[in-house]
Amino acid sequence: MNESYIGKSIPRIESVDKVTGSARYVHDMKLPGMLYARILTSPHAHAKICSIDTSRAEKLPGVKAVLTGPELPYKLGLYLVDKDILAKDKVRYQGEAVAAVAAVSEEIAEEAVRLIKVEYEPLPAVFDPVEALKEDAPLVHEELGSYSFMKGVFNPRPNTNIANHFKLRKGDVEKGFQESYRIFENEFRMPQVQHVPMETHAVIAEWLPSGRINIYTSAQSPFTVRNLMSVAFNIPHSRIHVVIPYVGGGFGGKAGIHLEPLAATLSRKAGGRPVKLVATREEEFNTIPVRQGIIARIKTGVSAEGRILAEDITYYWDAGAYADYGVNIGRASGYSGAGPYDIDNVRIDSYTIYTNHPYGTAYRGFGHVEFFWAIERQMDIIAHEMGIDPYELRMKNLLKPGSITITGEKIRENTGRVDKCLEMVAKEIGWKGSKTEEERKKEFVTGRVKGKGIAVLHKAPAMPTFTSSSAIIKFNEDGSVDVLTSGTDYGQGTYTALAQIAAEVLKMPLEKVHVVWENDTDTGPYDWQTVASRYTFMGGNAVIKAARDLIEQMKKVASAVLRAPEDELEIDNEKVYIKHNPDEYVTYQQLAMGYVYPNGNAIGGPLIGRGSYIAQGLTNLDPETGQGLPAIDWTYGAHGIEIEVDVRTGEIHVKKVVSAFDVGRVINRILCEGQITGGVVQGLGTALLEGYVYNKDGKLLNNSFTDYKIPTAKDIPETLIPLFVETPQLDGPFGARGVAEHPMISVPSALGNALYDALGIDIKELPITSEQVWKKIKNKVTK
Ligand code: SMO
């Protein structure tokens, strides 16, 4: 094979199935005898449940099962087991599921839900995470949840709303401040936001009378669903079967389990009939977990030359009513939370705090979008106040080969290069330093002002130690292959990358490699989770190992057939041949099911390659000191954004976004660019448009697309330039590292920085709405 598949722009292997509508999602599925479920949700943010009357609903013809919390002794939770499947004694957020119905049609289920009467007694609620830390704050949970199977990484406090407190300490922060020339203290805020997957959460579950559970779900990770179901119901994995067909977007919101236990319990109550439960768009907003909000307080000490000497950071996470992934997001922001900077003295306290908001979970970037809003805005504020070019300030402080990260790893030459990413971005966007106030004034009178902003980012894969991925490559009779994995491709394009990797290692045409789309815990190999930008890295490595295993087996058989030692054999173009005599060969097809000699004797057998890859992931950081060594390299990146602002309305027009990422090695250019485009646009949504708005009672006011705007084609920047730095990752597949989450990080901060450049105004709270900008402009003009 002359041409390599690595680094090419190969269209997604599933694209035709998707655009022609033949890809099957859970939303499309209908099983014989299937029932439809609807849920009743809480109208209160915090209230005692006094009584639930389901009698009228149960009498409605066509209703097959009605469920309420007291019937369900099980609890759910990833790190802390703190959530009932249906609210029991009280509700903790508006939108929490209180009762559920399964009926022969959706309309009847809907009607039955309306007939359920619940009596509540409202309780004082708390919505602000800082307020929730006060002595007299209402307690969201009277008792803390028990520990989950993911042990040892959290630190909850009894009789408080603290679900977790992660601490990182490095050097002597007080001494660092004493030695500082100037100290900067700021508070930054970001509200909760929604993942907004195109396909809402959907599940079909059947709890067979035999005790086995079948689950078809739009989730990110089949084995995680199986594991969490097993923990929740205390039944062995061997009795749970999870199938994940096509999934229309996850972004972290489908990383755990949400509707699965409810659908399964309804099915059990309905005698094992399959029950379909699909979240409405409104439920996707109100009931299904969201991205956590944050209040970030940062105090930075800087030398006269612009070196950061000390950083004291407190992150207050609005986890909402249940901890879910919030505990680990708090932890990840603890060890990543000072940015990709070389700082000797750091103190980070990251609190995951219960409030009466909908609960938080993973969302693309796993906390980093939130705290980088603070970190990278703070850098620009320091630069402006000290009269240093924001680019120079960053360059002075960024990690470079030889620096030590705040968790103690040494940056090597082959570690990703954040400085190179920033350099590339600055060049492409034409960075020439910040505008002067004089220049701003001159431009202001024209009515339209321009500004440029830059920001950097990093993220480590949030993987506990020893997570693994595995792959199976089966030879078909004709020498083509099927690749089985259990990582999911919910839109990232990972399966295309895996196909390329398999074709590359096996030296065969891409068209003859099929990655099995549907994930199935009964037949697929084990995988931990598809999260944390890990799958091309992990699954890619597993596929390489499986392909090499297959090659070894082929060589063994070919060695006997060709009467040549294995080490004299080579593979190429679907053949195993003798190196010094390429005319002597056997084809993959001949080897696939075993080689049959002309005399009829057979050798070998059906060949199947197996490979698994175990991550030398993060060591569990010491919960007391917060210290530890993340062993997998981090992905670094930078954004540059150019905007134009209409000074009469405060409307921001994004002209250009330049983004550079050190992805180690580009496996598929168009997919990497797609991840960047998607991430940047999603980041622009967070920056400019999105954010949950509540009334004082905790009622979500913008729970539909009428009031909650996400970016559409119209909002996409005129110019969007993705750039790559390729510092090969030693243990990555062909040198690659993850890129899925990173492009979303630091988009809001780069935009906030561009706004300062344009107008000399500092925004510290997301989203940067026109209203907010307009008020700041007015304020500045009248001052
Ligand atoms: S936010 Mo993700 O699915 O690690």
Image (tube, rainbow, N blue to C red):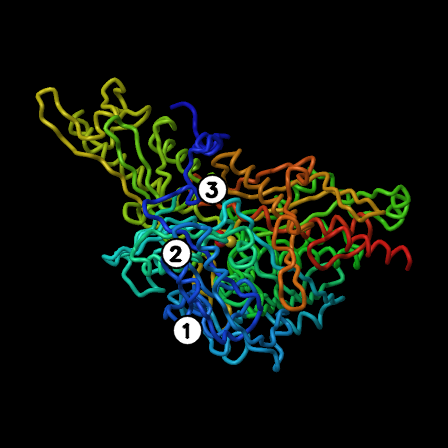
Separation of marks 2 and 1 at Cα, in angstroms:
40 Å
Work out whether mark 2 precedes mark 1 in sequence or the reverse, and give the earlier one: 2
10 relative to 622, above or below: above
Work out whether mark 3 precedes mark 1 in sequence or the reverse, and give the earlier one: 1
588 relative to 407, above or below: above
Give x and y (percent) for residue 130. 64, 72
Question: On residue 736, which mark appears?
Answer: 3
Separation of marks 3 and 1 at Cα, in angstroms:
39 Å
Residue 175 or residue 337, whichever sits in front: 337
Q: Which amino acid, mark 3?
A: Ala
Give x and y (percent) for residue 592. 23, 30
Q: Which amino acid, mark 1?
A: Ser
Q: Which amino acid, mark 2?
A: Pro
Residue 34 or residue 475, whichever sits in front: 34
Question: On residue 146, which mark appears?
Answer: 1
531 relative to 144, above or below: above
Which quadrant is home to the C terminus? bottom right
